[in-house]
Amino acid sequence: MGNGSCPDLFELSDGRFAVIGTDMTADLDGKLPDDASRADYEKIVVITRDTLLRAKPDIARL
């Protein structure tokens, strides 16, 4: 684990996706839309718009 900031989105070998981002659970948990929820074991992770847009072409190929 480094000290740099490297948000990323990548596919795991089992087909799930992993997100490396900033844990914002404490700040955003009470601000979720009415149709969104999270389990106790889940976290709200934030990535930049740029990170998601850069990943989009790779996701579209799946």
Image (cartoon, rainbow, N blue to C red):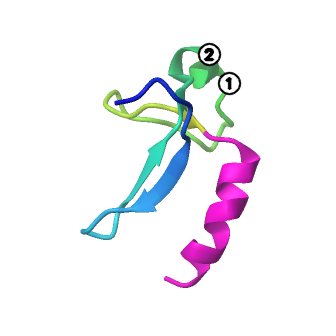
User: What's the amino acid at mark 1?
Assistant: Lys
Q: Where, by quadrant of the figure, is residue 58 drawn?
A: bottom right
Q: Nearer the viewer, residue 56 or 2?
A: 2
Residue 2 is marked as none
Side (left or right) of 28 relative to 2: right
- Residue shown at the point (66%, 37%) measured from the top left: 34
- Give the answer, above or below, for where 57 lies relative to 54: below
Q: Nearer the viewer, residue 41 or 50?
A: 50
Task: Assign the magenta stretch its main secondary structure.
Answer: helix
Residue located beneath label 1 in the image: 31
Q: Position of residue 33 (x, y in %)?
A: 68, 36
- Give the answer, above or below, for where 33 lies relative to 61: above
C-alpha span from label 2 to label 1:
8 Å
Q: In the rendered structure, does residue 1 fall within the stretch colored magenta?
A: no
Q: Which element carries disc 1, helix, strand or loop?
A: helix
Q: Position of residue 36 (x, y in %)?
A: 58, 41
User: What's the amino acid at mark 2?
Assistant: Asp
Q: Residue furthest bottom?
A: 61
Q: Residue furthest left?
A: 14
Q: Nearer the viewer, residue 39 or 48?
A: 48
Start-end of magenta stretch? 47-62
Q: In the rendered structure, does residue 50 fall within the stretch colored magenta?
A: yes
- Residue shown at the point (74%, 48%) measured from the top left: 49
Could you tell me if the residues under marks 2 and 1 are in contact, i.e. CB atoms within 8 Å? yes
Residue located beneath label 2 in the image: 27
- Residue shown at the point (38%, 34%) measured from the top left: 42
- Residue shown at the point (49%, 82%) measured from the top left: 62
Other-residue count near label 2 (Cα within 10 Å), few / some / many at <14 / 14–19 / ≥20: few
Q: Nearer the viewer, residue 46 or 33?
A: 46
Q: Where, by quadrant of the figure, is residue 1 drawn?
A: top left
Q: Position of residue 50 (x, y in %)?
A: 74, 51
